[in-house]
Image (cartoon, helix red, strand yellow):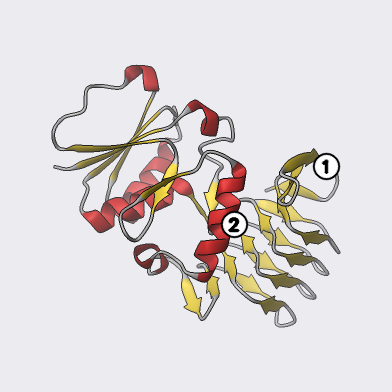
Amino acid sequence: MMKLCITANNEIELLGLDTMSIYGKEIVEYWLEYSRYKGYSELHIYGSNNNNSTKIQYYENMYGVKLIYTNQSEKSILKDDSDEYKGVGIFLDNGEYQVLKTLSDIVSLEKILSHSPLGYASSIGYGKSEQIHIGKNVYIHDSVKLVGAIVIGDNCSINQGVTIQNSIVDKGCYIEEGTSMINSHISTNIHMFKNLYLKDKVLFKSSIYDIATKKRLIHEGICKKI
């Protein structure tokens, strides 16, 4: 019974382990996809205490891999049947584990994956047409313009007059009419208000990350968390 063990470091945990996402999915989903692809029966994550049993059960049912969160202080000695990777990251097609230490690392890797998605990941749960990848249960109005490399995660709704260019919309987002996105990224479960313009930005519930300057600014009144 092979186990895959991920040890989260303190630096990346400050960004919020459960809310980090890349290419439209939470990072834990990449670990689960990789575990299933490689035949691991258990995925252990050390350094994050996640008590959301409903969410864990959902992932276990979806991927067929047992998901176990354990506090770093409670980490047991790994046995011979366990493979351990330190630091939060994702596995590339060649088996390399790429560690993500900052939000800039995530944004950079998203750009690469939007043009060349992981082989084992792109076949699970996402529609695919050239460089446009659409998740399940997604509504897109007929007037929406999709240009370039785009990812739209599961359970999203995108209303009329919206333009999305070379951008990523994480799962569970609602975008009202008239909004334009260029080279940007909307975080999970965000409701964007009308007629917004984002270029080279990452949008969170209460802050905007500027990709060029690598600075995060607080905002109000342009979106809310669903």
The relative height of residue 195 versus residue 54 in the rendered view (above or below) is: below
SS category of the residue bearing label 2: loop
Q: Position of residue 199 (x, y in %)?
A: 77, 61
Q: Position of residue 135 (x, y in %)?
A: 52, 67
Residue at figure coordinates x 54%, y 76% from the top left: 131
Residue at figure coordinates x 54%, y 66% from the top left: 114
Please identify the residue farthest to the top as the structure is shown: 73
Q: Is residue 65 left or right of residue 210?
A: left
SS category of the residue bearing label 1: loop
Query: How far, Cα to Cα, is label 2 from label 1?
Result: 19 Å
Quadrant in which the N terminus is drawn: top left
The relative height of residue 5 versus residue 104 in the rendered view (above or below) is: above
Q: Residues within 10 Å of mark 1 (few under 14, many from 20)?
A: few
Can you tell which mark lies on residue 170?
2
Find disc 1 in the rendering and name its residue.
Answer: 219
Quarter assignment of residue 53: top left
Q: Position of residue 109 (x, y in %)?
A: 53, 55
